[in-house]
Image (tube, rainbow, N blue to C red):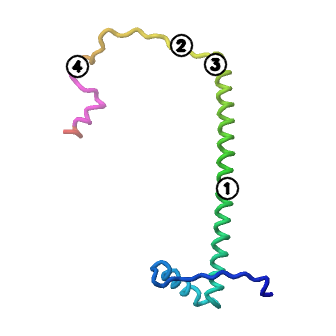
Amino acid sequence: MAGNQKSIFIRFNMDDKADKELYLKLSEKADSSASLTSYVKRALEEYLNVKTEMSERQQFHEHMLLMVREEMQLQGMKLVGALLAGIGTVNVQKIPEKPVMEEAGLPEACGRLPEELKGVLDLIG
């Protein structure tokens, strides 16, 4: 049975701040588990599983983006083709030219207000 086992040895330098902090965090988390070794083994396994899952999701996302871009390009080319095929076949109505008025001005001043507007002056004043 010992021949089928592999081992990894990790040494933490307690004079190095990063090593010391990592060791203390691992020790703190492992308190509730059977041993520090089994906790580190589980943590590495979870990390690798999450990393693999994230990689698979990233690949799926990239694949979907590629397919959407290809479909958009295909639909865009169909639209361009339809627009080009339709050039010259659409009847556009000509807008008749209106004679330009020589001098446009304000209407003549009125000496009195219409009945509907008399109440407005009372509200303002």
- The local crowd at label 1, few if under 14, some if 14 to 19, many if 20 or more residues have their Cα within 10 Å, is few
Residue 23 percent location from the top left of the image: 53, 83
> Which is more N-terminal, label 3 or label 2?
3
* Cα distance in 3D space between marks 1 and 4: 76 Å
Image quarter of residue 118: top left
* Cα distance in 3D space between marks 3 and 1: 42 Å
What residue is drawn where x is 22% and y is 19%?
A: 109
Helix, strand or loop at mark 2: loop
Foreground of the two, 21 or 96: 21
* Cα distance in 3D space between marks 4 and 2: 38 Å
What residue is drawn where x is 40% and y is 8%?
A: 99
Q: Amino acid at mark 2?
A: Lys
> Which is more N-terminal, label 1 or label 2?
1
For discs 3 and 1, the disc positioned in front in the rendered view: 1
Q: Which mark is residue 87?
A: 3
Helix, strand or loop at mark 1: helix
- The local crowd at label 3, few if under 14, some if 14 to 19, many if 20 or more residues have their Cα within 10 Å, is few
Q: Amino acid at mark 4?
A: Ala
Q: Specify whether 55 is left or right of 104.
A: right
Q: Residue furthest left?
A: 125
Image quarter of residue 92: top right
Residue 46 percent location from the top left of the image: 65, 74
Q: Which mark is residue 109?
A: 4
For discs 1 and 4, the disc positioned in front in the rendered view: 1
Q: Are marks 4 and 2 in contact (CB under 8 Å)?
A: no
For discs 2 and 3, the disc positioned in front in the rendered view: 3
The part of the chain drawn in magenta is 109-121
For discs 3 and 4, the disc positioned in front in the rendered view: 3
Q: Which residue is mark 2?
A: 94
Q: Specify whether 122 is left or right of 33.
A: left
> Which is more N-terminal, label 4 or label 1?
1
Quarter holding the C terminus is top left
